[in-house]
Amino acid sequence: MVHEVGAQEKITYGRNDRFHGGPVGGGHFWVDDGGLPVAKIGGPKEWRPRPMIDVREGDTFSVGGQVWRVTEIVGADTPEAHLLATRVS
């Protein structure tokens, strides 16, 4: 799916097939030693040979030519953990 700039997507455990060029999915969420939330997300074939990346709030990632910013990581140490990403270009 092609998203407009400013669109938001939620990434939870498992996969989100709504990303153009995706899917993208949450593999693990945790709080680092400094108390900040972190997510390990897996992505499409274009991310190979490193299919999983660690992201924090404010980080960006690209999927299918669309750039997304991690705007919030919620409940990083809970089973309901997820992140919100906003398309920036």
Image (cartoon, rainbow, N blue to C red):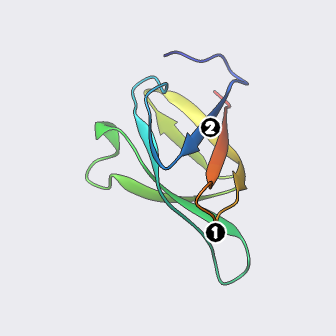
User: In the drawing, does residue 80 fall left or right of residue 52?
Assistant: right
Q: Image quadrant for the C terminus?
A: top right
Q: Earlier in the sequence, mark 2 or mark 1?
A: 2
Residue 5 falls in which quadrant of the image?
A: top right
The residue shown at (49%, 24%) is 18
| Residue that extends furthest to the bottom in the rendered view of this protein | 33
Which numbered dot is residue 49? Answer: none
Q: Report the amino acid beneath label 2.
A: Lys
Asked which secondary structure carries label 2, the reply is strand
Residue 43 falls in which quadrant of the image?
A: top left
Q: Nearer the viewer, mark 2 or mark 1?
A: 1
| Residue that extends furthest to the front in the rendered view of this protein | 79
Mark 1 crowd level (few <14, some 14–19, many ≥20, 10 Å Cα): some
Which numbered dot is residue 77? Answer: 1
Residue 56 falls in which quadrant of the image?
A: bottom right
Residue 37 percent across, percent down from the top left:
68, 66
Q: Report the amino acid beneath label 1.
A: Asp
The residue shown at (69%, 24%) is 7
Task: Please give the residue where the numbered disc 2 appears in the rendered image.
Answer: 10
The residue shown at (33%, 52%) is 51
C-beta proximity under 8 Å, tags 2 and 1: no
